[in-house]
């Protein structure tokens, strides 16, 4: 639409209008993925928090629905999750018509308390009713939020993770009916005590790809400050969950999920098909989210990512790969191409608004090499690999509009794990959309996610080498299925 800023993404989720932050209530149900989200239906700034709603069959093309859970009087609907209560344990539906149940945080401005509440749907998520005995969990605390609920098969009951945000504690509760909850255990505090709060906990059982048949648990939560890019960030730790308590495996401290500035409040889909969990995050930062020069909407989600673990001598590491949906190949390089020092524009095919690049390199003397995306003259977002320090970086200092926030124009670094051979030759995926760049490097062990606001209408792509030659061994360009395909 004409009123949109040029930054409305082609393949990333945005609300039709107004404010969005965290993904909420992600669930796969009856052939459709549901995405709810923190939403202000009344404006482009945070407030009147409600759950917006959209559905998709491929996680790329979304259909928008009316607000599912509205603000009620002084109580805003903060983040939470959604389950399919197949056996009607809650009694909120019937055996024949089991309910979808959303468990969310009520932020009661009049009492200064956050508590956990239920809403339910008997028509596949189209309309939602409020449970009349809300709240279902209230410990009288001001910062007690973001319940993640899932069915724990071995113990045959519901498990809830919820954050005591200021104390840096994740609590684990159990329930037979989603209505009454018993505290089982706590995790935390660990890590940097200066972090302002912990939010949005998540717990996943993911396959270890180099150990056939084995899985481990990933506990993930978001830090309100002191993240890898300076501001908010997303942390994880791998361990075991016995149905009551999460126990980290030895030696692993907190790790970063993503090394960029714009990755927060991730959530995984409950009941998703396939072996690997699927998650997505709010692609933004609380530091400047309110200053984003987009209209009439604010807030974008990352592309969904498949999640697994790779066992290493330093313990298990998170591996993420982008879920691209249906794509078609735009270009495939035949054989390796040797690049001399300098910048080499890619002119083989015209670039669509959104595309995914797959590259692999081998340094042949180069000290640094990489890709310039959204390029117009000097303006570009620069993805580089530094051979000497084995470090990937994403530089948006000259990516276009940056002056709306002093925190925006920066370079973000992610060192490759020690001892990994030839990291630069590992497969790299880069997902480019009108207003974002997502890098998946070192076989998915490193991701750097950043919003950008390029100013030029025509934007190119180049490859570069510095200090010597590099062999670009693989180059593939993929386009996404269009909304009408
Ligand atoms: C995270 C968060 C959550 C809270 C929600 C409110 O971004 O602060 O902790 O539930 O946003 O919109």
Image (spheres, rainbow, N blue to C red):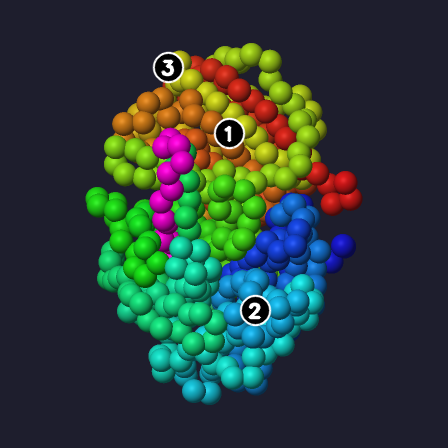
Q: Quadrant of residue 233 in the image?
A: bottom left
Which numbered disc, 3 or 2, marks the residue closer to the eye?
Answer: 2
Q: Are marks 3 and 2 in contact (CB under 8 Å)?
A: no
Location of residue 443 in the rendering, given as x and y in whole percent from the top left corner: 43, 31
Q: Are marks 3 and 1 in contact (CB under 8 Å)?
A: no
Q: Secondary structure at mark 3?
A: loop
Number of numbered discs on residues: 3
State the extent of the magenta-drawn residues as a range.
210-222
Q: Earlier in the sequence, mark 2 or mark 1?
A: 2
Nearer to me, 23 or 95: 95
Location of residue 252 in the rendering, given as x and y in whole percent from the top left corner: 25, 45
* Residue identifier under label 2: 88
- Does residue 474 sit above or below 233 in this rendering? above
Q: Quadrant of residue 364 in the image?
A: top left
Magenta highlight: main SS: strand
Separation of marks 2 and 1 at Cα, in angstroms: 52 Å
* Residue identifier under label 1: 371
Residue at 55% from the left image edge and 49% from the top image edge: 272
Q: Is residue 377 visible?
A: no
Q: Are marks 2 and 1 in contact (CB under 8 Å)?
A: no
* Residue identifier under label 3: 365
Separation of marks 3 and 1 at Cα, in angstroms: 17 Å
Q: Does residue 479 appear left or right of residue 259 in this picture?
A: right
Residue at 39% from the left image edge and 68% from the top image edge: 174
């Amino acid at each position: 639409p004409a009123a949109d800023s040029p930054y409305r993404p082609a393949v990333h989720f945005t609300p039709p209008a107004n404010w969005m932050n965290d993904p909420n209530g992600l669930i796969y149900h009856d052939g459709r993925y549901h995405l709810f989200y923190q939403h202000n239906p009344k404006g482009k700034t945070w407030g009147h928090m409600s759950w917006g709603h959209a559905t998709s069959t491929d996680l790329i093309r979304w259909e928008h629905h009316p607000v599912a859970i509205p603000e009620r009087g002084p109580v805003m609907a903060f983040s939470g999750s959604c389950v399919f209560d197949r056996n009607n344990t809650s009694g909120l539906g019937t055996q024949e018509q089991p309910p979808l149940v959303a468990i969310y945080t009520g932020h009661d401005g009049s009492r200064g308390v956050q508590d956990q509440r239920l809403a339910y749907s008997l028509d596949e998520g189209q309309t939602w009713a409020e449970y009349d005995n809300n709240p279902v969990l209230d410990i009288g605390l001001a910062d007690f939020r973001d319940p993640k609920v899932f069915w724990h098969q071995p113990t045959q009951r519901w498990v809830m993770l919820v954050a005591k945000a200021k104390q840096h504690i994740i609590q684990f509760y159990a329930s037979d009916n989603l209505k009454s909850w018993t505290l089982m255990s706590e995790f935390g505090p660990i890590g940097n005590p200066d972090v302002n709060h912990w939010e949005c906990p998540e717990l996943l059982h993911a396959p270890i790809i180099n150990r056939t048949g084995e899985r481990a648990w990933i506990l993930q939560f978001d830090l309100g400050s002191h993240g890898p890019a300076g501001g908010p960030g997303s942390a994880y730790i791998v361990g075991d969950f016995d149905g009551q308590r999460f126990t980290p495996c030895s030696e692993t401290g907190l790790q970063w999920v993503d090394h960029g500035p714009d990755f927060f409040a991730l959530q995984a889909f409950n009941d998703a098909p396939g072996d690997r969990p699927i998650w997505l995050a709010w692609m933004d930062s609380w530091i400047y989210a309110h200053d984003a020069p987009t209209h009439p909407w604010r807030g974008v989600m990352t592309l969904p990512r498949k999640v697994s673990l790779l066992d290493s001598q330093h313990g298990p590491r998170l591996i993420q790969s982008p879920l691209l949906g249906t794509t078609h190949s735009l270009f495939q390089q035949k054989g390796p191409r040797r690049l001399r020092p300098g910048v080499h524009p890619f002119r083989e095919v015209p670039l669509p608004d959104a595309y995914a690049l797959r590259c692999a390199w081998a340094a042949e003397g180069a000290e640094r090499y990489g890709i310039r995306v959204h390029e117009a003259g000097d303006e570009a977002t620069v993805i580089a690999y530094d051979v000497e320090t084995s470090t990937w970086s994403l530089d948006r200092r000259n990516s276009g509009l940056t002056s709306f926030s002093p925190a925006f124009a920066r370079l973000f670094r992610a060192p490759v794990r020690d001892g990994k051979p030839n990291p630069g030759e590992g497969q790299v995926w880069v997902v480019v959309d009108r207003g974002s760049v997502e890098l998946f490097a070192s076989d998915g062990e490193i991701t750097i996610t950043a919003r950008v606001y390029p100013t030029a209408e025509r934007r190119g792509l180049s490859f570069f080498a510095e200090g010597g030659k590099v062999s670009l061994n693989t180059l593939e360009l993929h386009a996404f299925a269009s909304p009408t395909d």
